């Protein structure tokens, strides 16, 4: 998966808008709440996850996934786009959106 594939997936989800992040990187938000950030060179992505998911992904594949900061029940996970399994990464990205989007937007996502 590359940066353009991430962008296409994110912008295909209900209510998602692309913004410029604090360091100039692409940031994806739903109702002004960030949930996915591409690195400036678009080689990696940082995404919102549950703490348990962050721990599991880092333990399973530390070459691809690394932990970032955590607060409350959420933790942020960094993924190397070139090394990540595309299907697994898609699931993580959509889950990051689900953790942020309101229920009425989640209901608009077709299975």
Image (tube, helix red, strand yellow):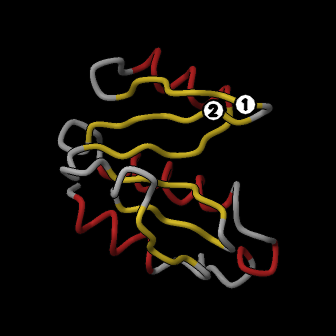
Position of 96 with respect to 85 (left or right) is right
Residue shown at 59% from the left, 75% from the top? 111
Question: With respect to residue 79, does 5 lie above or below?
Answer: below
Identity of the residue drawn at 44% across and 61% down: 27
In front here: 103 or 86?
103
The image quadrant that residue 110 belongs to is bottom right
Q: Which mark is residue 18?
A: none
Q: Tell me how far mark 2 sits from mark 1, CA to CA.
A: 6 Å
Residue 29 vs residue 14, the one in the foreground: 29
- Residue behind mark 2: 75
The x, y position of residue 54, in whole percent, is: 56, 28
Identify the secondary structure beneath mark 1: strand
The image shows residue 32 at horizontal and vertical percentages of 65, 69
Q: Secondary structure at mark 2?
A: strand
Q: Are marks 2 and 1 in contact (CB under 8 Å)?
A: yes
What residue appears at the point 48 percent right and 65 percent down from the top-left corner? 28
Residue matched to label 1: 71
Q: Position of residue 90 (x, y in %)?
A: 42, 56
């Amino acid at each position: 998966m590359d940066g353009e594939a991430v962008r296409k997936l994110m912008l295909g989800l209900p209510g998602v808008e692309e913004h410029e992040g604090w360091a100039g990187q692409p940031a994806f938000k739903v109702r002004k709440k960030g949930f996915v950030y591409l690195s400036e060179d678009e080689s990696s992505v940082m995404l919102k996850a549950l703490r348990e998911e962050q721990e599991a992904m880092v333990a399973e594949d530390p070459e691809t996934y690394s932990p970032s900061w955590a607060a409350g029940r959420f933790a942020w996970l960094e993924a190397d786009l070139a090394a990540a399994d595309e299907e697994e990464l898609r699931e993580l990205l959509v889950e990051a959106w689900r953790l942020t989007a309101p229920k009425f937007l989640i209901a608009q996502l077709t299975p």
